[in-house]
Image (cartoon, rainbow, N blue to C red):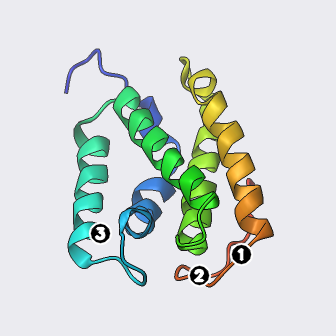
């Protein structure tokens, strides 16, 4: 690992790397029900690779892509709202914590935070059957 590579972003929270792979795979899946295990494994591998070998910029690009999935899901009746709520809450929490890190991460994610807040409000207002269970507000303590 390069001495110039900043890894401070890795200390934020383990929730994204633990909770996102299965839920993001559910959002990416075109089939209703649980996502195929191969899709979950591929998503888990992608997240692992980003965390172990990536940069904060690459990680934020991935989370921007995931944010777009949540925003799309909020406008769709065919997507699992439970997965979208889980993903949206995890990413929004992550992006809010960026305020405590050096650099421009918090500023760079301002539009995503706004979009996620709007999408989560829509998803909460029109909940449907959820594969990932009911969404509960996360404690920020």
Residue for badge 1: 127
* Numbered disc 2: secondary structure: loop
Please state which of the two labelled residues, at mark 1 or mark 3, is closer to the viewer. Answer: 1
* Numbered disc 3: secondary structure: helix
Query: What crowding class fits label 1: few (fewer than 14 Cα within 10 Å), some (14-19), or many (20 or more)?
Result: some
Q: Which mark is residue 56?
A: none
- The picture places residue 135, in percent across and down from the top left corner, at 68, 73
Q: Which mark is residue 40?
A: 3
User: Does residue 138 appear in the picture of this structure?
Assistant: no
Query: What crowding class fits label 2: few (fewer than 14 Cα within 10 Å), some (14-19), or many (20 or more)?
Result: some
Residue for badge 2: 130
**Circles 2 and 1: CB distance less than 8 Å?**
yes
Q: Quadrant of residue 20?
A: bottom left
- The picture places residue 108, in percent across and down from the top left corner, at 57, 23
Image-based side of 109 in relation to 20, left or right: right
Badge 2 or badge 3: first in the primary sequence: 3
- The picture places residue 124, in percent across and down from the top left corner, at 75, 67
User: Does residue 33 appear in the picture of this structure?
Assistant: yes
Q: CA distance from mark 2 to mark 3?
A: 17 Å
Nearer-the-camera pick, 47 or 39: 39
Q: Which residue is rendered at x = 62% and y = 64% of the image?
A: 85
Badge 1 or badge 3: first in the primary sequence: 3
Q: Which residue is rendered at x = 56% and y = 49% of the image?
A: 91
Q: CA distance from mark 2 to mark 1?
A: 8 Å
* Numbered disc 1: secondary structure: loop
Relative to 99, residue 96 above or below: below
Nearer-the-camera pick, 48 or 100: 48
């Amino acid at each position: 690992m390069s001495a110039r590579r900043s890894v401070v972003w890795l200390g934020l929270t383990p929730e994204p790397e633990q909770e996102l792979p299965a839920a993001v795979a559910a959002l990416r899946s075109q089939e209703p029900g649980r996502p195929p295990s191969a899709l979950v494994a591929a998503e888990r591998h992608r997240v692992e690779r980003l965390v172990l070998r990536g940069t904060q910029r690459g990680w934020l690009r991935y989370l921007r892509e995931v944010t777009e999935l949540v925003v799309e899901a909020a406008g769709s009746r065919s997507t699992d709202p439970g997965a979208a709520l889980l993903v949206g809450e995890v990413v929004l929490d992550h992006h809010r914590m960026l305020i405590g890190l050096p650099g421009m991460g918090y500023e760079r994610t301002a539009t995503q935070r706004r979009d996620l807040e709007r999408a989560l409000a829509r998803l909460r207002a029109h909940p449907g059957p959820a594969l990932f269970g009911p969404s509960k507000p996360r404690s920020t303590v």
